[in-house]
Structure formats: C-alpha cells, structure tokens
Image (cartoon, helix red, strand yellow):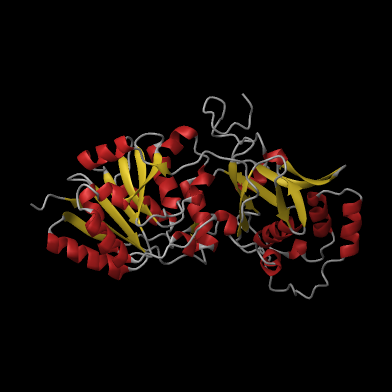
C-alpha cells in the first residue's frame, strides 16, 4: 500500500504524519497558526519566502523545525531543542538590573548589510544570533530574564521555528478562537469540553447534533466516540449546515461513515408530521453562513510584520474521506423507534427554544441534552419553557471560566491577555411528561 492512502487504518500511524494528512503548524510559539495539508507541492510562507513542507512528511507530531540554509536555498530542517531551551532561564543570584540601559539604537554595531553578507555566505540563523549578541554593547549588562527575551526576539526574526501539531478538537478550537471566534460561534475550548461532558458523549452512543459552528462540534463528538456509535447532524430545510472543519481531523473512512446527516423533516415525519416541521422552519428563519477553512482571509502585510496570531487558509488539498453522508433508512427507522442517546445544540443564529421543542422528543427518556449559546437570555427563556412544559429535569445553566497561566522559573502568573467570556451551556435530562 502507498503511504498517501489516507483511508487505510493498517498503514497509517496516527502519531506520524503522512502525505495527504492535515496538520496545524505553530510558527514561533503561537505567533502564527497555519492549517495545511501535507502534499509534495504544499508550501509555507514565512516572511517573504515560501518553504516546502515535504520535510514534514513522515515526522512525528510534536516535532520542531527550523529554517536553515542549504545548497538549494533555505529549507525547513528538523531539530531537537537543547536542554537549556527546554528548561528555560535558570534562576541565578544577580545584583544587576536594566535601569542604566538606554534604548537609543546605538548598542548594536552589526549592521543590516553585515547580516545580509553573513546570509550570502551561508551562515545559519543561530550563528547570526550569536553575532548579534557578541556585537551588542548592552547584552552583558542585562538581567538573565532580559537576555533570554532578547534571544527569543532575535530567534523569531532570524531563525523562525515551526512546531508540527496534530489537529485535534482542542488545537483546532484554540486556533479558531484566537483569530476568528465568530466562525465557531465564540465556542471556547473549555466550553466545548464541558458541552461534551454534560451531554455524556461516550462510546457506542448515538448523538443528535445541530452544528452551526462549521463542523467543530461534529468533529469533536466523532473524535470522542473513537469510531463507535454514530453522529447525526440534523438541519432545517433542504440545505445542511457546512461541516468543513471535520476534514482537518484526519478521520479515516470508518469514522467518517459514522458521521451522517438527516433533515429534521425525515427524523420527525412519523412523530410530529410535515406541517409542524414546516411551520417551525419558517419560524426559526435560520441564517446559516458558509464556514470554510479555505475562505479564511489571508493575513495582511501589516499583520505578518507584527507577528500577530494568524490562522491562515489551508493549502490546496488532496481528497480526504468525506464525512456527512445522508443517513440510511435503517438508521432513521432505528432512531425513530429507540431515540438518540443525547442531544447537543450549538446554533448561535437560531432560537434555542424553537429548536429544543422539536428536537427533544427525538431522544430517549432519561437522555441528557446540552445547548450552547454565546448569550444568556435565549437559554434562560428555553429553560423556563422547558420547566413550564415539564419536558426535562435537573436543568442548569453553566458559565465555563478559564484562566491561562504562564509557568516559568520565578515568574508564574496569569497571562496578561486572555478571554474573559466563554458563553453559556444549558443542560438537563429529558423526562416523560405524560
């Protein structure tokens, strides 16, 4: 079998990249985040140059790469960080400080012409950094922490590094939330994990979804099921919600077959009738925007120069297993008779109560449900209506809260910039009201 057969479970090692797989490239420790599919012709743009991604094929996820100069020009070369880099700056007793240092751009004697000449002679990025340190009049006067910050700053400019990350529910959610949170309904990673837990997503479950966050929720549920059970995406009208993000999870054919779609009309036809579904469809008037990774805008020159967090579009991709085929008649019949194991809704553009009152009868009795929304009021209204109609018990509205910490020697503290809002989740258990 060929290495680029993405559909073969017996050949592919999930811990090692292969030709045709999706990857998340972390450039300079989070300064840029780029989705790409590894092919023979795929490239990565860093600065004003493009680098081939061929050296990344066949490497374990978590590998680090650095730009080096070769006979055919600069290229991405795999490297292993030294022990000092992994441990960070060591604590030393020192009495010096930075108060006497004046930043007047006169401390560095190495000019840009000298750096260009070193590059023409084939000097590596690390050699340029050492030359900059040696020609700095103030480097030795700086504290150990300031020296480390200086090294990191120059390393990002003259020796950019790329971390090869595996696309997972967590990494994909974090990447989108940093730059384009509106494309995933402002669904933060802690809210996503809590959503799956409250809905009791576990092996061999049949999960009913309303995913209007680009397929992130669908991929996260399928990843947690691990190739068991089934994920059914339902939608109103004739056009299903786009689930393009599912393609970045590197699911094999077996998992993709368990991700299906079914219009709400088909699921409810024997229970509520066509007229009620059509009226509900008109009442909701859902406006679904097409969410596609390929349509994510390219970073501007100003953004690239400032090294902001950027989620760039994917490279041209080869064919991956297709998820979201139409559910079979046998599966529809089974779900109508037995009900789904749980219900999860992430539909920022739809009214929560109008969806729940139609979808809740589709899950079995004592089955959990979880509804995400970025605002509190729609969930509060839905919870009140559920209590009035006696359709569920044990309901609660949760607001997840996440704080990220910087953990370094002698400087552990909360991160200076972090999200203060993660949306709300309404959860509960369906009961028989008759």
Q: Residue furthest front?
A: 275
Q: Is residue 409 visible?
A: no
Q: Is residue 217 above or below residue 301?
A: above
Q: Is residue 174 visible?
A: yes
Q: Position of residue 416 (x, y in %)?
A: 52, 66
Tell me: residue 106, above or below residue 28.
below
Residue 382 in which image quadrant: bottom left
Rendering quarter of residue 295: bottom right
Please state the horizontal and vertical placement of residue 302, each as a whole percent of the image: 69, 69
Q: Residue at x 70, y 51 (%)?
A: 44
Q: Is residue 212 left or right of residue 95?
A: left
Q: Residue at x 27, y 62 (%)?
A: 280
User: Which of the 4 quarters of the picture holds residue 19?
Assistant: top right
> Between 234 and 7, which is closer to the camera in this rendering?
234
Q: Quadrant of the N terminus?
A: top right
Residue 49: image x %, image y %?
78, 55
């Amino acid at each position: 079998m060929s290495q680029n057969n993405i559909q073969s479970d017996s050949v592919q090692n999930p811990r090692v990249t292969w030709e045709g797989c999706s990857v998340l490239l972390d450039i300079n420790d989070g300064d840029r985040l780029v989705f790409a599919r590894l092919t023979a012709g795929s490239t990565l743009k860093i600065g004003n140059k493009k680098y081939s991604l061929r050296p990344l094929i066949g490497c374990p996820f978590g590998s680090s790469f650095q730009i080096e100069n070769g006979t055919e020009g600069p290229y991405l070369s795999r490297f292993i960080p030294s022990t000092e880099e992994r441990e960070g700056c060591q604590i030393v007793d020192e009495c010096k400080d930075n108060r006497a240092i004046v930043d007047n751009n006169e401390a560095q004697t190495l000019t840009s012409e000298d750096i260009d000449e070193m590059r023409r002679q084939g000097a590596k990025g690390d050699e340029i950094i050492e030359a900059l340190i040696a020609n700095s009049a103030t480097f030795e006067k700086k504290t150990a922490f300031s020296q480390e910050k200086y090294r990191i700053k120059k390393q990002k400019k003259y020796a950019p590094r790329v971390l090869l990350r595996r696309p997972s529910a967590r990494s994909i959610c974090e990447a989108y939330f940093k730059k384009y949170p509106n494309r995933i309904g402002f669904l933060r990673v802690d809210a996503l994990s809590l959503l799956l837990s409250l809905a009791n997503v576990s092996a061999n479950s049949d999960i009913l979804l309303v995913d209007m966050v680009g397929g992130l929720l669908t991929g996260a549920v399928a990843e947690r099921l691990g190739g068991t059970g089934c994920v059914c995406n339902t939608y109103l009208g004739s056009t299903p919600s786009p689930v393009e993000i599912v393609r970045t999870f590197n699911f094999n054919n077996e998992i993709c077959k368990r991700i299906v779609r079914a219009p709400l009309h088909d699921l409810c036809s024997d229970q509520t009738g066509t007229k009620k579904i059509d009226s509900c469809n008109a009442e909701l008037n859902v406006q679904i925007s097409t969410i596609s990774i390929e349509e994510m805008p390219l970073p501007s020159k100003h953004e690239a120069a400032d090294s902001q967090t950027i989620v760039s579009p994917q490279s041209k991709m080869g064919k991956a297993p297709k998820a979201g085929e139409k559910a079979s008649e046998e599966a529809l019949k089974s779900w109508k008779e037995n009900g789904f194991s749980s219900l999860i809704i992430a539909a920022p553009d739809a009214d929560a109560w109008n969806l729940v009152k139609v979808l809740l009868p589709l899950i079995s009795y004592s089955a959990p449900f979880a509804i995400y929304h970025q605002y509190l009021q729609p969930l509060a209204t839905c919870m009140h209506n559920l209590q009035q109609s006696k359709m569920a018990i044990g309901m609660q509205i949760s607001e997840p809260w996440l704080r990220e910490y910087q953990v370094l020697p002698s400087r552990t503290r909360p991160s200076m910039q972090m999200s203060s809002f993660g949306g709300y989740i309404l959860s509960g258990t369906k009961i028989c009201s008759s």
